[in-house]
Structure formats: C-alpha cells, structure tokens
Amino acid sequence: MTAVDTALANPVDVAYLATAILFILGLRYLSSPKTARLGNRISAVGMLIAVVATLTQGIVNWYVIGAGLVLGAVVGIVSAQRVKMTAMPQMVAIFNGAGGGAAALVAAGELLKYTNSGAPISYDISFTSMLTAVIGAISFAGSIVAFLKLQEVMTGRPITYPGQQVVNALVLLVILVTWGMVVAGVQPILEWFWIALPAAFLLGILFVLPIGGADMPVVISLLNSFTGLAAASTGFVLGNNVLIVSGALVGASGTLLTVLMGKAMNRSITNVLFGAFGAVKSGGAAAGTKGGQNVRSVSADDVAAMLAYANQVIVVPGYGMAVAQAQHSIRELAEQLEKKGVEVKYAIHPVAGRMPGHMNVLLAEANVPYTSLYDMDDINPEFERSDVALVVGANDVTNPAAREDKGSPIYGMPILNVDKANNVVVLKRSMASGFAGIDNPLYDDPKTVMLFGDAKKSIDGVVAGVKAL
Amino acid sequence: MSAHLLTEVTIFILAVFVGLEVISKVPTTLHTPLMSATNAIHGIVLVGAILVAGTLDAPFNAIVGFILVVLASLNVFGGYTVTERMLQMFRPKAPAPKPTEGAK
C-alpha cells in the first residue's frame, strides 16, 4: 500500500476507510439496547464492503477462497442459529478461537510467501509476523480449552500440577528464542517458525488449564482482546489499515471487559491467571469446618406464600439458573407475582455466569424486559427495602463473608447485599459449597430459608403455589 | 522500526483510544452482545485471509490457505448471526407473553 504521494488513493483503501468508520459507528450504536441491532447491521455492512473490495485484488485461487468462504459461512450461520442461549459462552469462545487461528495462519502464509520467493524479509515484517502468529496461536488454543471447559467435556475445576509455572516459563522461553532467531534472520527461518507456532499453541493450552469455571468471564474477555491484537498485528504484516483499526477496537473492548471483570472479583488479572483460584486453599478448608450449617429447608408452597404477600421481590440469578434453564420459569413467576401487585426486580452481579452479561442475555431470551435488570451498584441499596431476595443458583456473589470475614479467600469482592433483605430464599441443588469451596454464612442466617432441588422444577412448583393462592 | 510501521502503530494507538471511548458507553446489560459483536469485527482477518490465500499456489500452501479462509469465514458469519439473534431478544417492556420464543 505504499503509494507515491501524488498518486490517487487506491479505491480499495477508500473502501477500507469506510469499513473502519462503519465499525466504529456500529459499536457506538451498541450504547443502547434500542439501537444495538442497527449497530450490528451497520457493522455487518462494513464487513461486506471490506470483503468485496478485497475480492477485487488479484486473486488467483478462486476455488480455495470460494470453497473456504462457503464452508465457513454455512457452518458459522447454522451453528449460530442453533446454539442455545445458555451455551453462548462456548459459542463466543469458538468464534474467538477461529479468529485467532486465522490470524496466526495469515502470518504463516506471509512468511511462506517471502521464503518461497527468496525475497529478503524486513525486520518489521518478521517481527510482526511472529507477534501475530504467537498471539493468534495462544488465543486459538486457549479458546479451545475454554470451550472444552465450558462445554464440560473437561472438568471446570482448575487443573494444576507441580512446577506449572516453570513449565510455562520454559515454553515462553522457547517462543522468545525462536522469535529472536526469525527476526535476526538466522536460517532456516521457516523451521524456527514451525517451532514457535506449536510452542505458542501449547502455551495457550497451559495458560487456560489452571483457570476455573467461575473465572471464565475474565478469560473469555482476555482471549477476546488477544484475538483483537492478533488481527491488528496482521494489519502490520500486510500493511492494511482496516485490519489495524478493527483489531485495535476489539483489543480495546476485550481489555476493558477484562479489567471490569477483575474489579468485580476484587482480583488482579495476574491473580486470575496464575492464582489457580478454587484449588482448595487452606483458608477455605478451615472455614469449611466451622458452623453446623443450621439451615431451614422449606417447601415450594411456603415460598409461594412468602413471595405473593411481599411488596418487592429481588431475584438474584447465577450460573445455576443457566444450568437448570430456569429463566423461562422465573419470568412466569414474575408475571404471576406482578398480577398480585408485587414488584419484581433482578439483581445482576457482573461476574454471575460464565461471561460478561451472561445473565442479561438469558433473561432477555425469556422475555424479561431489560428495564427490570439492575446492576450491582444500583440494586444494593434496594435490598433493605425488599421483603424477599430470591437467590436462584448464585452462591459466592451473595456471600456476606466477602464483606465481613477478613480471613475469607473472597474477602473484598463486591457482593450483592442479599442478606440485607427482610427474608432470603435460596434455591440450591444441594448443600455443596460454591465454586470457590467456601461456606456461605448466608445459609445459616435465621432469616434465610432454603428450597432444595433443580432450580427449574423448584420455580415451577412455586409458580403453581402462587397460582393456587 | 521503519517510518511506515511507525505510522501504522500511530493508527493503532489512536484506534485503541477510540475503542475505549466508544465501548465504555456500552451498558452492562449488553456486554455479551458486545463480546460477540467485537468477535464478529475481528473476523475482518478474513480480508487478510483472502489476500494471503488468494495468492498462494503450492499445494501445501493452498491447504493452509483453505483452512485459513474457513476459520475467518466461520468467525464473520457466525459472529454476526449470533449477535443479531441475541439483540433481537432485548426488549424494553414485556410484550404479550410468547412462551414459545426461543424455548430450547
């Protein structure tokens, strides 16, 4: 794209500029649920313009491009149409991995081309090619592991082993050395590259393995930002501005979400990545021994009566709601309660679920208006004024120990002040402790009652109870 | 670092700031669609995929090119479709109950 100053701009580059603008506008329209759909379409038009413009560039292998495009489109559209809303984190992980893998292969393709032609490779190209390949491969492999964990093909528990950090450091060292070799132009360049690429792939796997299910919102955001950076870096390799701008936008978005998620757990990103949280810690185990867990178990009809005569009920959904697919039943319960004049609000913790905004999407799927969904800071003062807090499959984000018990592993994490409500109803499958392996003193609270069982069946029972009143 | 790369890095950094500015205005309720929308946007790597795959000719390279285009295309089409599907569910007020909507 190096043009002489007096030459007219290449029309393709003008098209790319239009694409960059449309992407930015598209994201801007995401600032309100009312305009978000328009935003997504504006962004899609931008994409179409860029792809069509690119197809006008001296393509020789039409069959490769055509077949690849069609296959990718069919698989992509069909799976996107079929996926359940509860499986959205996995889907996002897969698409993210695909982008990262593609970026890494673009870098590979460019290096192949240079080495085949025997043309000298500038430092800029070799450095940015390696950057793209390494970040892309890490994102690709990390996304696959995240997918396998979310899909529960492999355990969601952190996988740790002795010397983990040492192994990671060694793999990183291999990557850095081979990177250096390629940039320094030490022959044979391609062989160095083919060592670096699998090493980066391995590092991607290794870095997600020790991260537990409840930390997935951070990891998914981080991988999103990695793929963005890899795409931007592809732009450096190819000298293509639209790739640079788009990649930067995605990188910024992923980074912002990563930081937000970290804040919502009161943990630094390094702690999430290297802390192997959820591996049973001595502090958590010690806390587990105290308290006889004097919980009060009640029936669905008891809960129905409690809810029906309340003025305000706050529903607190967590990952358990997603697992039980209870969102439709909850919406039905809310409708029944609203008929009886009860005000129903939803309190959403930023890290509830497995990705940022996971609960919001599930409740939207069940036709819950987004105007009833409240962020943590907005809803916390409301608990004191509420008759009942209904906790559906959320645990650690409601644990008062995070506020009060300095010895607790989750001390300092911002929580929903569920214990401030007049009554608390907790829907839980069993008394097993939450992801973090920490007991929740909320369950021992005299104003808390427990309704054990599958969240969906429990709620359906409560709905029947409310209708019968 | 060449002057050319420096210009590109400048563009990158300015775009990061634009991104932070625009994305900080997205409400938390839309964070999942935001992730999937940005996911679709990084599918722009498809442009790179076409440029690279379209000019590779050795058989081995053609295989790399093909995988490359499939991955990028999957990313683009899947990303936009799933974002659209999610966004059409967000409603300000509950309409007349349509229990069939999106069930299983």
Image (cartoon, coloured by chain):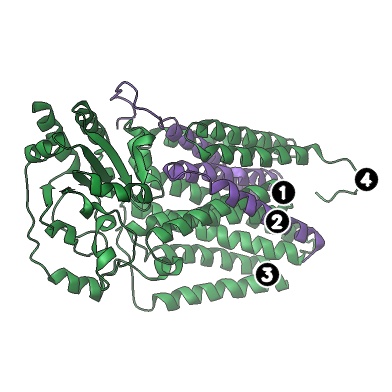
Chain on which label 2 sits: A
Q: Which residue is mark 4?
A: A6
Residue plotted at (21% across, 26% down): A339
A13 left or right, relative to A93: right
Q: Give percent across and percent down for residue A396.
A: 26, 58
| Mark 1 to mark 3 CA distance (whole Å) | 25 Å
Residues A307 and A350: in front is: A307
Which sits earlier in the primary sequence, circle 2 or circle 1?
2
Which sits earlier in the primary sequence, circle 2 or circle 3?
3
Q: Are marks 4 and 1 on the same chain?
A: yes
Q: Are marks 4 and 2 on the same chain?
A: yes
Indicate the amino acid at tag 2: Phe
| Mark 4 to mark 2 CA distance (whole Å) | 24 Å
Which sits earlier in the primary sequence, circle 4 or circle 1?
4
Screen quadrant of the C terminus of chain A: top left
Question: Which dot marks residue A241?
Answer: 1
Colour chain B appears in:
purple
**Circle nearer the viewer, 3 or 4:** 4
- Residue sitting at the far front: A385
Q: Give percent across and percent down for residue A323.
A: 26, 45
Residues A436 and B56: in front is: A436
For the residues bearing labels 1 and 3, Cβ distance under 8 angstroms:
no
Report which quarter residue A325 is drawn in: top left
Label 3 packing within 10 angstroms: few (<14), some (14-19), many (20+): many
